[in-house]
Image (cartoon, rainbow, N blue to C red):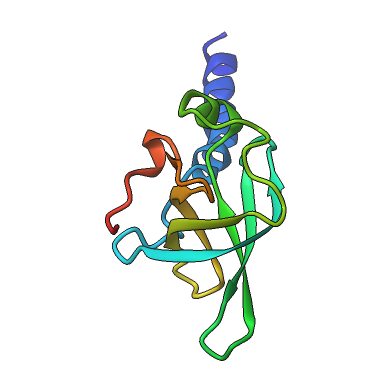
Amino acid sequence: MKLHASRLTLLTAVLAGPALAHHSFAMFDHDHQVKLTGTVTQFQWTNPHVYIDMDVPGDNGGLKHYTIECANPGILDRSGWRFNMIKVGDRITTIIAPLRSGESGGLLKQVTLSDGRQFNNGAPAGEANIK
């Protein structure tokens, strides 16, 4: 019986490892946040994360596409978000913790909608450190 319990405990620990790793924010640079203003190309209100895709004017005059990870719908709902508050074509401003890899994406810290309302990404993501 003890051997069975030990194996079950070990199996649970092994399987829980990937689940814990999924929620790490280590891939984002929280110390060097950036502000982006652009046009929404897609808004995905899905589990386990909500995503905002947006095109931002680049330095060379072209557009740079960003994929921004948000919290899950439950956390965002408790923070005042609604599933239909962001629409394709909306012009928004975001503050993100960019990907450490340099790719065009990041973790949302704050979004300002075209009507001026501001929303954060819930407590686990942390606060914006720029204005």
- In the depicted view, which residue is nearer to us: 23 or 11? 23
Q: Quadrant of residue 5?
A: top right
In the rendered view, tell whether residue 128 sits above or below residue 16: below
Residue at 70% x, 57% y is 89
In the rendered view, tell whether residue 10 sits above or below residue 44: above
Residue at 54% x, 56% y is 92
Quarter placement of the C terminus: bottom left
Horizontal and vertical percent position of residue 91: 59, 58
- In the depicted view, which residue is nearer to us: 38 or 114? 114
Q: Answer with left or right where residue 61 lies relative to residue 37.
A: right
Horizontal and vertical percent position of residue 27: 46, 60
Number of numbered discs overlaid on the protein picture? 0
- In the depicted view, which residue is nearer to us: 43 or 3? 43
Residue at 57% x, 34% y is 72
Q: Farthest residue in the bottom direction? A: 60
In the rendered view, tell whether residue 109 sits above or below residue 84: below
Horizontal and vertical percent position of residue 90: 64, 54
